[in-house]
Image (spheres, rainbow, N blue to C red):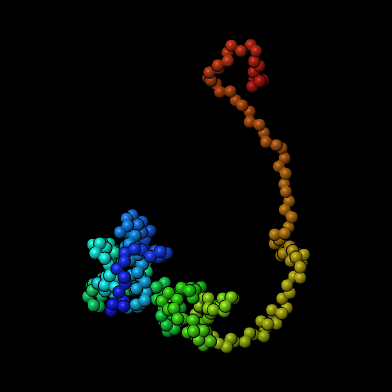
Amino acid sequence: MASLMRPSSTTPAIGTPKPSITPAATAALQASRTGSELLSQIHYAEKYLKEKFPTAITFDALLDYLSLPQDLLAHKATLKKALVANSHVAYTSASESASGRETFSYKPTHPVTNASELKQYLTRQPTAAGIPVKDLRDAWPTLQVPLLRLSAQHEVLLTLNKKDNTPRTVYADSPHLWPPKPIDERFVEFWGKCKVPANETEVRSVLEEAGIVPTSAVKEVRKILGGKKEKRRVQRQGARTTNTHMAGILKQYGRK
């Protein structure tokens, strides 16, 4: 049991990634040195839960693993609250737990740990967009060999990375779709008769014959006759004139 205990040092590790809690909670914890130390402990707790996935761990068991120093034990309520708010941690209350105790467990991006779960999970997806393999590694780090086996059996469809031919995205598949059914000869004949225009000029001619304006058509620039009319200045009635002393010199251009 002693080999599972973390060192009681409270100094945050250099380069330790931030746990997945809300930005507001992170800012509140970082407001003090104690908060910074608690953030490190939350990261250690999240990492430990990931190692134990899918096993649920009680809060007391987590505290035993973390081996918190005396000054941080006074803030264990804050630590618990932060774990409950963590997006990568699943919290189960005592009333919902089979053991009658509060438990925490790791919450992966996709809850898949074996081939059977993957096939069922893919069939429940609302779209056929596929799932990135890197996201599945979160809960199933040894998935590469099983994925290649499932692909060979046509249970899943894989796309591979060009660099090293490793699985990149996985899609649902079915052995019942293999081998692919032959294409109707009538469709093959019809497809062969469809001629594709050989060059841009032919494409433009076909579009114009169909009444479609091609994007390469020269747009006619229409010139607007007449320039912008100068707005006539209308003297407001009742306006106060401040240059009455020059009435005999200035000419009233606004009057006809």
Q: What residue is at 65 percent from the left and 12 percent from the top?
A: 249
Q: Position of residue 190 (x, y in %)?
A: 69, 80
Q: What residue is at 50 percent from the left and 86 percent from the top?
A: 149
Say whether residue 40 is left or right of residue 159: left
Q: Residue 87 lies in what quarter of the image?
A: bottom left
Query: Total number of numbered labels?
Result: 0
Locate the C terminus and report the quarter of the image it occupies: top right
Q: What residue is at 71 percent from the left and 42 percent from the top?
A: 224
Return the residue nearer the eye: 199 or 170: 170
Question: Can residue 164 be seen here?
Answer: yes
Return the residue nearer the eye: 231 or 180: 180
Say whether residue 168 is left or right of residue 85: right
Relative height, residue 68 to residue 161 (above, below): above
Q: Position of residue 148 (x, y in %)?
A: 51, 84
Q: Position of residue 113 (x, y in %)?
A: 41, 80
Return the residue nearer the eye: 35 or 194: 35
Locate the N terminus and report the quarter of the image it occupies: bottom left
Q: Position of residue 38 (x, y in %)?
A: 32, 62
Question: Can residue 123 be seen here?
Answer: no
Q: What residue is at 74 percent from the left and 55 percent from the top?
A: 218
